[in-house]
Image (cartoon, helix red, strand yellow):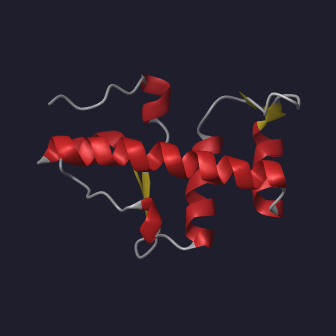
Amino acid sequence: MPFPIIDRPSQKKPLCYDPVRDKFIYYQEIITGKEKIIPVDSLSDDDFKKLVIKRVRSGPEVTGGPMTSPFHSRDDTINEIKNGTEFGQQTLLAEKAVLRDLLSEIERNLE
């Protein structure tokens, strides 16, 4: 099976975080075997927030918001995550779901 296709901007976002080494791990490092997948469920809440904040910082300046609210800037989104607002919590849940699925698909293809 082929690896999932990830566009170049998304490849600049880390997929994993190793808290022992304080290292963010990227797609190319995983598929080339230089780094191992660290499951998002194994991270503490603070370490997962660190990963998501790094992903947000690595993304576009403006991020989508829920259908009932305006778009958010990167800094707004990061502040919402840090402050534990409803939008910040929803962002964390969405990122966790996306990363679980993506890492699972990558792992299947590594075998």
The quadrant where residue 51 appears: bottom right
* Percent coordinates x, y for residue 74 in the rendering: 75, 39
Q: Is residue 25 above or below residue 31?
A: below
Q: Is residue 7 above or below residue 11?
A: above
Q: Is residue 59 above or below residue 100?
A: above
The quadrant where residue 65 appears: top right
- Residue shown at 33% from the left, 25% from the top: 5
- Residue shown at 40% from the left, 72% from the top: 21
Residue closest to the far front: 68
- Relative placement, left or right, of 67 versus 47 is right
Q: Residue 36 versus residue 110: which sits nearer the camera?
A: 110
* Percent coordinates x, y for residue 4 in the rendering: 30, 30
Residue closest to the far right: 69
Q: Residue 86 versus residue 34: which sits nearer the camera?
A: 86
Total numbered circles: 0
* Percent coordinates x, y for residue 103 in the rendering: 35, 47
Q: Quadrant of the N terminus?
A: top left
Query: Do we see residue 23 in this rendering?
Result: no
Query: Do we see residue 13 in this rendering?
Result: yes
Q: Residue 32 versus residue 2: which sits nearer the camera?
A: 2
Q: Is residue 25 above or below residue 49?
A: above
- Residue shown at 48% from the left, 70% from the top: 43
- Residue shown at 29% from the left, 41% from the top: 105
- Relative placement, left or right, of 34 versus 49 is left
* Percent coordinates x, y for residue 17 in the rendering: 45, 61
- Relative placement, left or right, of 101 versus 94 is left
